[in-house]
Image (cartoon, helix red, strand yellow):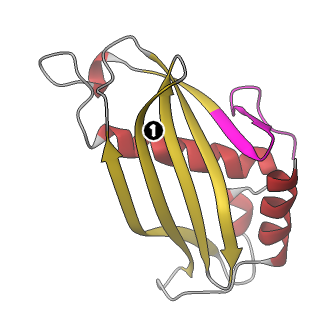
Amino acid sequence: MSPSPHSGAWSAGVHRLPVRVYYEDTDFTGVVYYANYLKFLERGRTDALRSAGVSHADLLQLDTPLGFAVRKVTVEYLIPARIDDALTVETVFTEARGARMAISQRILRSGEVLITADVEAACIDLDGRPRRLPKTVVGAIKAARAD
């Protein structure tokens, strides 16, 4: 699967995804509503996986369909983003073993860090039970990290 040109890019083990802040992302003051940063982070993780060759749609087509669920997220809000800002979501998969992935993320504006996040995601089946990450997923993440 070849990555979309809109899926960001990997460089030196870091995936970078450009994101624009739209009116719908902000509160009445034009500042990004805190929960919307989680959407930006989700896009970063999804596009990092996609551009590494991991397709969510393909995982759902396995004999035992699989998906990912966020188990834990810790976010530190440092500086607010505002309407029309051009942001970059950086994603680094720090660990992928067993049924879980550890992911470190940041959102930046012109190189300035706005938020940091540590995310733990679990691989699950359709009943919500943890399942070992497929070897193809672990291999794709390791290859992207080694880039």
134 or 11: nearer the viewer? 11
- Residue type, numbered disc 1: Phe
35 or 127: nearer the viewer? 35
Q: Please give the count of numbered marks on the rendered protein.
A: 1
Spot the residue most to the left.
28
Spot the residue most to the top.
84
Query: Residue 55, how many percent across, how many down?
Result: 73, 56
Give residue 5's quadrant in the image.
top right
Give left or right: position of 74 versus 136: left
Give residue 125's quadrant in the image.
bottom right
Task: Report if residue 116 lies within the magenta region.
Answer: no
As drawn, 1 above or below 18: below
Residue drawn at (87%, 40%), measured in percent from left and top?
2
**Magenta-colored segment: predominant secondary structure:** loop
Residue drawn at (69%, 27%), measured in percent from left and top?
6
Q: How would you rate the neighbour count of disc 1 (Cα within 10 Å): few for under 14, some for 14-19, many for 20 or more? A: many
Query: Residue 52, how many percent across, how many down?
Result: 80, 50
Task: Report if residue 14 lies within the magenta region.
Answer: yes
As drawn, 28 above or below 96: above
Give left or right: position of 57 versus 123: right
Residue drawn at (23%, 22%), measured in percent from left and top?
31
Label 1 secondary element: helix
- Label 1 sits on residue: 40
Query: Residue 8, how many percent across, how many down?
Result: 70, 31
Residue drawn at (75%, 82%), measured in percent from left and top?
63
Give left or right: position of 109 versus 138: left
66 or 134: nearer the viewer? 134
State which region is magenta.
1-16
Query: Residue 28, how many percent across, how many down?
Result: 12, 19
As drawn, 19 above or below 14: above
